[in-house]
Image (spheres, rainbow, N blue to C red):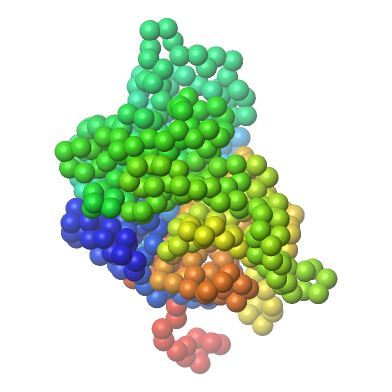
Amino acid sequence: MTIFRAVFAGLLLAFCPQINADDNWHQPAGPNGNWQVSGNPPVKWSVTRNENIRWRTPMPEAGMSGVTVWDDRVFVTTHVPIQSLEEKNAVTDILGFCLDANTGEVLWKVTLPGSAFISLAGGFTDGTVFAPVTDGEHVWFFNRCGSMGCYDFSGRQVWLREWKPRFKHNNRQAEPYLVGETILNVEVADKKFGAKIQKWAAPGVKSPNTDVPEGIDEKAVWTYLHGIDKHTGQVLWRENVGTVIHNTPVVGVTADGRLAVSHARGGPHQPFEKPAGQSLTSLAPGEEGRTLWSTEMAGYDPSFANHWNAKYVFGFRRGHHVVLDASSGTLLREQPLYTGATVWKWGSADRKWTKQINVSVKAGKGHPNTNQANIVIGDWHWFLSHNVHYLGRVHVETGVVEYLELPAQLMASRDSRDQDVWLWDKGHPKNLPLNASGFAVGDHGHTGTGWGHISAASPTLIGRYLFLPVVTGTVYVIDTERETLTPDALVAINDLGPGGETWTLATVTSAKNRLYAHTMQEIICIEAESRPHSEAEIQ
């Protein structure tokens, strides 16, 4: 564990002393708040062949949330079931589930209402996109269609907040954080007028009227980080510079040991929140929501998780990697991502990787990385490329850039005696996000491979291994302790279900050396086999 991770974990434990980082994944970003935990997870499995799978629980409808784990409880959300494909364009309510972590049995479920249709299994989001948050006594579920609720561990409702969000302000980014007694959530400032200001009249249809009503402050319809009292659901504070919903704020620790949150503005679709740029806001007791600094950066596209440490804040702009001083917000350097790179590229003719050095790569196509699919580990910032199947990383000090071409998709064999098939360049031509009823739900990117214009799940670091899930249910496992990003760093490619029939936008989470995944059809618990099979079981 790095010094930063150790300090951050210590501060979080001071706020929530009951959290055990090895046993619980209590919020979307995990127990350390950065999608990184220690552990010795399974690195190879197959859902298709039921290898290293502890249990699988079918879900009644599609959902995108990561799986939250506390001791012997698992929490997750899905949409309410639809009876026909036409209904997918109107569903707003979601279900919050509690399952037994050891068996996958559903213990109870609750319904959270919604008031603004967003999408069902969209390529960027749906109502279920936020993972639940828990503190070991209560669990908070989030419906991106306009509600959040608090429940005890028996499923009894403690409180419910409802509001109508701005339509299309709904990316999977901006996931909530639990910091002490406060839940951080990005939402529109004025809940009454914010819902009336729509940049989109319907899915794919731009609204003819996006003007702010006369007499209403434009900033009232901005989205901001809010501090929500976890006990009552009341708003305690909100920051004052704005946070675009394309961005995932990330909590961390400053050089002088204070909790703070990194967040940003900018990106596509002409967001209201201006100017584009990066901010750091205090979470220290007594100064929650106070701006520590805010740096304007034209062309900044913060469609990513806003990783940082006590020294630097990281971002992307116009094909460059951005490094800012974490104490002052001063822009220190911008390092090009597409020139002078080292690439291990796959050759379809000779069926092997070849190393190329000091080359230009077309890995961005106007975007620096697949939305949100990035993570900072030590001195390296890892990301999925936008329009080619490259895993990339940039050294935050030197600017060295490395790429490794990965298979576009895994087609796992159903018989262990047969070899898995790796598809290169393009995925299976009939990829469909099938729900439990066999409907091909989804409204963007649902036939692709998970690269490109889509809000892919955040990768997770567990021990030394980086787990990278993409929408096809393909999960790449990378050894991050390799000195260079070579094909040898690719430890395994696993499946979360049959190729072409499986779809997911959920982060892989971890607790007690188990992995948890959520697809359109089921919740999966992955655990390495620890006992020998008997002859009868093998037969």
Residue found at the very far right of the displayed protein: 349
Seen from the viewer's position, the closer of residues 500 and 181 is: 181
Residue found at the very far bottom of the displayed protein: 535
Residue placed at 27% from the left, 41% from the top?
282
Residue 216 on image: x %, y %:
38, 12
Seen from the viewer's position, the closer of residues 87 and 348 is: 348
Q: Quadrant of the N terminus?
A: bottom left
Tell me: 171 left or right of 182. Answer: right
Q: Quadrant of the C terminus?
A: bottom right
Tell me: 435 left or right of 188. Answer: right
Residue 407 visible within the image: no
Number of marks in picture? 0
Residue 401 on image: x %, y %:
59, 60
Residue placed at 25% from the left, 42% from the top?
283
> Is 478 rendered above or below residue 340?
below
Residue placed at 28% from the left, 53% from the top?
255
